[in-house]
Image (cartoon, rainbow, N blue to C red):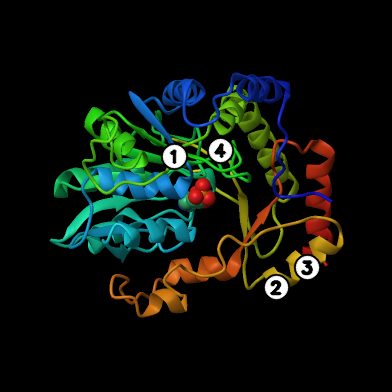
Amino acid sequence: MIDLAAVELDEVAERLVLDVLRSGRLAQGPMVERFEHEFAALAGTEHAVAVSSGSAALVLSLQAVGIGPGDEVVTSPFTFVATLNAILQVGAAAQFADIRPDDFTIDPAAAADAVSSRTAAIMPVHLYGHPASMAALMQLAGSHDLRMVEDAAQAHGAVADGQVVGSFGVGCFSFYASKNMTTGEGGMVTTDDPEVAARVRMLRNQGMRDAYRYEAIGYNFRMTEVSAAIGLSELRRLSDRTARRRINADRLTEGLRSVKGLVLPSVGPGREHVYHQYTVRITADATCSRDDLAAALLAKGIRTGVYYPRPVYDYDCFTNHPLVPPAHMPCAEQAATEVLSLPVHPGLGDEEIDAVAVAMRDVLDA
Ligand SMILES: *Cc1c(COP(=O)(O)O)cnc(C)c1O
């Protein structure tokens, strides 16, 4: 079976986890601090604060920059539900802006149209590991005095115009098992702003800065030492593994050129894609439907994924939600019907990538 993702931990992980187990310190401690320090170097930020998940990172970031009831947050409708959940969990309203058809990230022109007098933040999603249009979005944020909160859950180490994602404003990363680096469950908030970092630290630990002096209604969103040990080992080999993702993606692109009804991923100017997913479109011109293709590939031992089958506004729990506006976003809706993610994870070699290309051609060239 050629899978979409694989967890493959190395001996460094085993050694560091064993160090933690033998230390007798399992809850947030020195290993978490070390992981934060090293992750800040990757993100190119002054501060990094480890938390229990990417979802927790999103909630704490919004709250730490002061987003709450009465505020609107402009975001993409074509994302994992955690992006929207975080906005609603802090009591803010979502305001969607449609995506660009070429890279599936929020369209800056649509984002500009979505800004109102209540807008307090922009939350782009670096979907599939491709950075959003940060230059235009930063300009928009600057001209309307909006906070920039990046959902970088899928984009560890991705770059836009020479700058690492997660360093434009407040960055939110996930270390869920399927992401480009993992801690099992975990997340990170990155920022250059010492006050934001301090607020995230306070909120993740029950609203305390000093023991039993509560300043706000907080959470237990701490990371464990075992998770941080795994994260440190994953961080050490992230750049090698990202390089392998790129080699796999380029090879797959070569193998899939000029197939009717197949649109291959494109990389925007100045962007460095980290291929959390290698996502193609199967258009109406293809010889078979997206879902039939996925089934045919599965029968050949190749797992694929649809991220995501609907825009986030298109679920019953959100359609009548007072903080989710009714939306009809043609690009997001079309993408939801056409996208298919193919395996490129770093555990795969040339032979497996070639097998994916051959299987795709077998079905689509028929
Ligand atoms: C994975 C993911 C999240 C949530 O991260 P968790 O660690 O699973 O909580 C948020 N946004 C996007 C775009 C994601 O892919």
Q: Which residue is labeled 2 in the image?
A: 289
Direction from residue 241 to residue 211 in the image, left or right: left
The amino acid type found where label 2 is placed reads Ser
1 or 3: mark nearer the eye:
3
The relative height of residue 28 versus residue 112 in the rendered view (above or below) is above
The amino acid type found where label 4 is placed reads Val
Q: Looking at this rendering, what residue extends furthest in the left direction?
A: 117
Direction from residue 216 to residue 262 in the image, left or right: right
Q: Which residue is labeled 1 in the image?
A: 269
4 or 2: mark nearer the eye:
4
1 or 4: mark nearer the eye:
4
Q: Is mark 4 within 8 Å of ligand 1?
A: no
Q: Which residue is labeled 4 in the image?
A: 274
3 or 2: mark nearer the eye:
3
Q: Identify the residue shown where x is 50% and y is 32%.
A: 27
Dot 3 falls on a residue whose secondary structure is helix
In primary-sequence order, the first of circles 4 and 2 is: 4
The answer for how far apart the CA atoms under marks 3 and 2 are is 10 Å
In primary-sequence order, the first of circles 3 and 2 is: 2
